[in-house]
Image (tube, grey):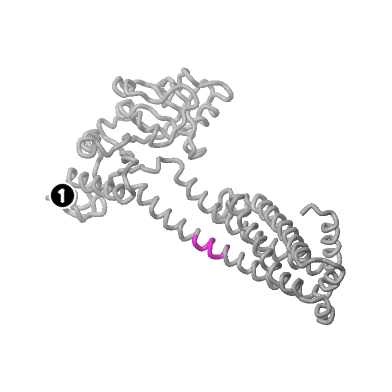
Amino acid sequence: MFDLDRWHEIFEAIGKNKLRTLLTGFTVAFAILLFTLLFGVGNGLQNTFKKEFADDANNAIFVQADKTSKAYKGYQAGRQIQLKDDDIDFLINEFGDDIQYLSPRIYNFQKATYQNESSSYSIRGVLPDHQFLENTIIDYGRYISKLDVERRSKVIVIGRLVEKDLFGEHSALDKNIALEGINYKVVGVFSDVGGDNEERIICMPVTTAQGVFGRNDDLDQINLTFNPEMSNAEAIQFGKNIQQKLREKHDIDPRDANGIRVQNMAEANQQVGQMMFGINLVVLIIGLGTLIAGIVGISNIMVYVVKERTKELGIRKALGASPANIVGMIIQETIFITALAGYSGLVTGVGLLKWMAPTLEEYFITDPSVSRGVVIGATVLLVVSGLIAGYLPAKRAAGIKPIEALNSV
């Protein structure tokens, strides 16, 4: 491998056969380039789906109420269903062992003021479990506590961007923010993987929100997470059971698709999983097709190359070169060209993905990238294929007698 004379011969052969070398290298580089781009785009689509669902726990269930569409038990169609505090107790009694976290939500939109700064933000009344339902990250301070809920404390936890808007570079912790003229103490500042919109939210105890907003025991939404030990099928059925029980409690026709709506992340995960499987399958088939085309191209070129060099190989044998020496030289040359070309295709592909990343985001392809292991494995496959493609005809050519080789051209 480190025989300088052999390397000199290899570079001399490459220099004399530039077109052949270029064709071989281009075949490998182009195959790896396409392979890299395909897998990069496929991974970018997966990243987009992951990003869309990163804001909430992936085992979350969201319960909302709306108007019924069917008359039932003396009630007219179009009746507005209202979630209340006792629905929380009902769910805990019915499904407590299967519920991991649970929190209602009350929504409002109010103007927040601190000294001379003010802006309007979305307000959420929540329970302590809401932190885990939303994958909320406390930067400093704390989240809403059980004691805050019991005391109906006027405390709030604000998003990172709310702090930036109202306090600039200063800390908001333990400061008072006025919401429509009522002061609330900031007990914590949070970040959220959901991005800017989720970081411009203010959270307060649900009991405080009910009192301040005049909501009595009304709730806008109930969020919960199911036991993560559940299988996907069990989680989907669990969501249906919640919907059925709440419909019974609120006297809604079992056949009514409205009234109580349940959004189950288990169903979304199943759909995304099926879609990702389809995308990966298509990418894999096209990627393998690209590699096979590259392998066929290398094989055809190497067969032609060895045939073209039959006279040269005959002269080498006449001068004393052994069959093993001839085969080794061709294999080493093949490996060198395919490895160098494969690496070039890999670098070009990765570079193109990075360059196109901003543009691809407009087409819902986020952070397109590819695992080095996958592409290196594909490159190794092409190199091995080139080695085999070069070995078989080289072995046949090395077995020809010098006089036959000289007379063959």
Query: Whole-percent x and y of residue 384?
Result: 65, 61
Where does the magenta region start and end? 281-287
Which residue is label 1 attached to? 75
> What amino acid type is highlighted by mark number 1?
Tyr
Which residue is drawn at the image coordinates 81% and 71% (left, top)? Answer: 313
- Badge 1 marks a residue whose secondary structure is loop
Name the chief secondary structure element in magenta.
Answer: helix
Give residue 129's quadrant in the image: top left
Q: Residue furthest top?
A: 174
Q: The N terminus lies in which quarter of the figure?
A: bottom right
Residue 32: percent from the left, percent from the top? Answer: 65, 59
Q: Residue at x 70, y 61 (%)?
A: 29
Relative depth, front residue between 383 and 152? 383
Q: Is residue 389 left or right of residue 80?
A: right
Looking at the image, is 350 positioned above or below residue 116? below
Q: So how many labels did they put on this image?
A: 1
Q: Residue sitting at 25 percent across and 47 percent down?
A: 243
The quadrant of the picture occupied by the C terminus is bottom right
366 left or right of 308? left
Let me know if residue 167 is in the magenta part: no
Q: Is residue 285 visible?
A: yes
* Picture layout, residue 185 above or below residue 302: above
Q: In this rendering, does residue 221 appear at all?
A: no
In the rendered structure, the answer to whether residue 215 lies left or right of residue 130 reads: left
Residue at image coords 36%, 42%: 60
In the rendering, at what x and y percent does residue 160 appear? 51, 30
- Name above or below for residue 108 compared with residue 305: above
Residue 141: where, in percent of width, then height?
46, 21
